[in-house]
Image (cartoon, helix red, strand yellow):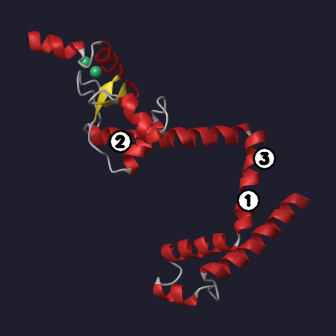
Amino acid sequence: MSIQVLEKLQWKHAIGHYVNAWHGGSKPKFPEVYEQLGGNTKEYRAYANRMYRLAHPELRKKWIAKKAVRYQVDEKFRQSLRDAHRKHIQKTKLLVFTHYSESPPKCACCGIRGLDFLTLDHINNDGAKQRLQTLGAKNMGGMHTYSWLKKRGFPQGFQVLCWNCNAAKHINKGTCPHQVRNTRV
Ligand SMILES: [Zn+2]
Ligand SMILES: [Zn+2]
């Protein structure tokens, strides 16, 4: 067994003992809370973990530094972070779009489905103004808008449109040509 593996095992062993005490092995670190939350439950472990992190702020710095190094050298790790980030964005987008449309979301004008085809539209055409007011920049859209809406409980004034209808609406001073044609027919 190499020295690195041995060190790792010893480290894991030591940490295991320590964490076990916090979590409630033979002698839990917070016996009262341990009793209250019904033993070594998920809730108790979350509590113990939180306390552990609060008691060891230096570990977070170490952890971040370690991740930063790994990010520099490990392409697989970079890719996994990118994937997780993308998944997170897609999940939030789906949640927000489902709220402003239906499940699965579709364009309010032409009815096309598919998350990648869709975008969020400010019904009153004041998107740039609103973004400036709430986010501090005109060109901050996408994920910033999605999480902003989610945080504020989905305020009114938005609808889901496809990129085509959205662009056409702006070119035609607020009405998609689809709608003009429909009213004429
Ligand atoms: Zn459309
Ligand atoms: Zn349209």
* Local SS, label 1: helix
Compared to residue 106, the image places residue 170 above or below, namely: above
Rendered-image quadrant of the C terminus:
top left
Q: Is mark 3 within 8 Å of ligand 1?
A: no
Q: Can I make out residue 1 in this image?
A: no
Q: Which residue is mark 3?
A: 69
Amino acid, disc 2: Val
Q: Which residue is mark 2?
A: 96
Q: Is residue 128 left or right of residue 137?
A: left
Q: Is mark 2 within 8 Å of ligand 1?
A: no
Verify CB contact (< 8 Å) between mark 3 and mark 1: no
Compared to residue 49, the image places residue 70 above or below, namely: above
Marks 3/1: CA–CA distance: 12 Å
Verify CB contact (< 8 Å) between mark 2 and mark 3: no
* Residue at x 65%, y 69% (from the top left corner): 53
User: Closer to the N terminus: mark 2 or mark 1?
Assistant: 1
Amino acid, disc 3: Val
* Local SS, label 3: helix
- On residue 29, the disc is none
Q: Which residue is mark 1?
A: 61
Residue 72 pos. (x, y %)? 77, 40
Rendered-image quadrant of the N terminus:
bottom right
Label 1 Cα crowd, 10 Å radius (few <14 / some 14-19 / many 20+): few
